[in-house]
Image (spheres, grey):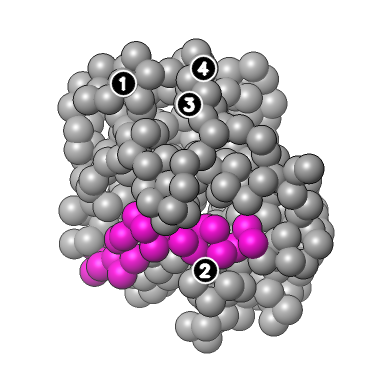
Amino acid sequence: MTGGAGYVGSHAAFALLDAGYRVVVVDDLSTGHREAVPADAVFVRADVGDRNAVAEVLRGLDVSAVMHFAGSIVVPESVEKPLDYYANNTMNSMALVRTCIEGGVKAFLFSSTAAVYGAPDRVPIDETMPTKPVNPYGASKLMTERMLADASAAHGLRYACLRYFNVAGADPAGRAGQSSRVATHLIKIACQTALGLRPRMSVFGDDYPTPDGTCIRDYIHVTDLVAAHEQTLTHLLGGADSFIANCGYGKGYSVKQIIETMEKVLGRPLPVDIAGRRAGDPPELVADSTLLRKTVGWAPKHDDLEQIIRNALDWEESLIRSGRLVPAE
């Protein structure tokens, strides 16, 4: 897998090892952490766009399937640095797909995003709805989806694009979580605020066309997300057709609701400021995941917002105990 030293990739590595797979992680550690890679996985430090390095891994380790998690994922940053996102998310993916086809890879799973839908006219969102990304992050991922479809038609590569909604939480067993010091996801930011790693947190916009004025998102526990990947891998390796599917629970929570739930778990209020809107943020994204459930038999086991928040908090506290993060004074 690529990006196995990152948030979702590290969880997937543990899940696949638990299921008996041999796991090879390719990561350049530009944003990932070497210590996040399970000890039982083979680790290769390389850029996924380095075709020679990836070809050597495929050839030397007899790789039959690839999960592609590597990429840039911060929406506001993509608006500020669009060419970086097209380079890292689209061009590097093109190089990887070409190398995989030449290397005889049988199945390819791509980490895509709900951002490909842009600002949809209705929710929940199903896969038949138009793809109209409103930021370079979503556009860069959609380009890779189209590339995979064309490459599959030409070369027979079986693939799945899993469109993530908002991934959150951490491994309930405490083996993995979001390790980045600079938080960009709401629940991680709230956890860091709760634990004194930052003095305050901001709500970016309270004037959206939603019930409480703040953005609404579908939050999926990372453990359920990687279970979907494992089931999809089995599906593709069994000879099934390629597909694209949403990964979410089908329910949305606003930014204010997330903060209120965090405060409930903590038993105290958080210091919160209201700030202006961020560029590229759609008002509401909620998944219809019927296709994923029917196609691979996915049935989530951690669809509980308080559990998601508690697992995320537990992980942040473990980072502090290990000395990897230090609370603000």
Could you say which disc has been placed on residue 275 in the image?
4
> Of circles 1 and 2, which is in front?
1
- Residue in the image at 30% along x and 29% along y: 284
Instruction: Name the residue beneath numbered marker 2.
Output: 171
Whichever of labels 2 and 4 marks the residue nearer the N terminus, that label is: 2
- Residue in the image at 27% along x and 52% along y: 249
Using the rendered image of the protein, determine whether residue 159 is visible from the camera's viewpoint.
no
Whichever of labels 1 and 4 marks the residue nearer the N terminus, that label is: 1
Instruction: Tell me where residue 118 sits by quadrant.
Output: top left
Q: Position of residue 89 (x, y in %)?
A: 60, 36
Whichever of labels 1 and 3 marks the residue nearer the N terminus, that label is: 3
> Of circles 2 and 4, which is in front?
4
Magenta stretch in the rendered image = 295-317
Q: Is 32 on the left-hand or right-hand side of 259?
A: right
Callout 1 touching callout 3 (CB < 8 Å): no
Callout 3 touching callout 4 (CB < 8 Å): yes
Q: Position of residue 127 (x, y in %)?
A: 25, 40
- Quarter holding the N terminus? bottom right
Instruction: Name the residue beneath numbered marker 1.
Output: 213
Instruction: Name the residue beneath numbered marker 3.
Output: 203
Q: What element does badge 4 sit on?
A: strand
